Image (cartoon, rainbow, N blue to C red):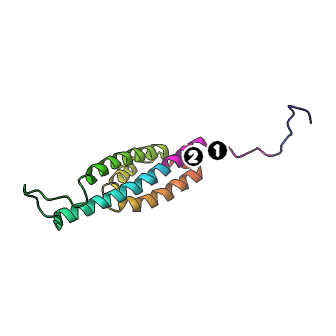
Amino acid sequence: MTHGETTPTTDAGPAAVDPRAAKQRGALGRYRAMAWITGVMLLVLTLEIVLKYVFQVNGVGADGEVNDVLGWWIAPIHGWVYVVYLAAVIDLWSKMRWKLSRLVTLALAGVVPVMSFVLERRVHADALARISAGPAAAAR
């Protein structure tokens, strides 16, 4: 064989990677990570609220305010984590071309304790099934 010659092949070559499927998988991975982080932060925030207001673990300060239990920073951190979670939800929702009701459900999962963990499993399974089915499933 001389330089520059190619050998003929009988197959179509490596399977073409669907760029849309790659973007969907990336969005799904980001969503899964943020669902877990948001869920954990929400559980920590819930624990803080229950310990602080129900059991008043650290008591009440001289000014009449209930003292923080785990730290003042939990609520603002959860708030910003939730904003990033919403961005991941919108990204996944738009790439998967789901209905608006799915977007609302995914958004609510970040504010209901434990719901993000439950919904993450369902969304992951559904998304993988749609990605595997290819472009024909996008019409659903």
Please report the residue visible at 10 percent of the width from the left and 58 percent of the height from the top: 61
Left or right: where does residue 55 sit relative to residue 41?
A: left
Please report the residue visible at 56 percent of the width from the left and 42 percent of the height from the top: 20
Look at mark 2 in the image and give the residue it sits on: 21
Q: How many marks?
A: 2
Neighbours of disc 1 within 10 Å: few (<14), some (14-19), many (20+): few
Local SS, label 2: helix
Image quadrant in which you'd find residue 112: bottom left
Q: CA distance from mark 2 to mark 1?
A: 8 Å
Asked if disc 2 and disc 1 are in contact, CB closer than 8 Å, the reply is yes
Q: Nearer the viewer, residue 85 or 77?
A: 77
Start-end of magenta stretch: 11-27
The three-letter amino acid code for the residue at tag 2 is: Ala
Please report the residue visible at 58 percent of the width from the left and 47 percent of the height from the top: 136
Left or right: where does residue 69 sit relative to residue 131?
A: left
Look at mark 1 in the image and give the residue it sits on: 17
Image quadrant in which you'd find residue 120: bottom left
Furthest toward the bottom, the residue is 55
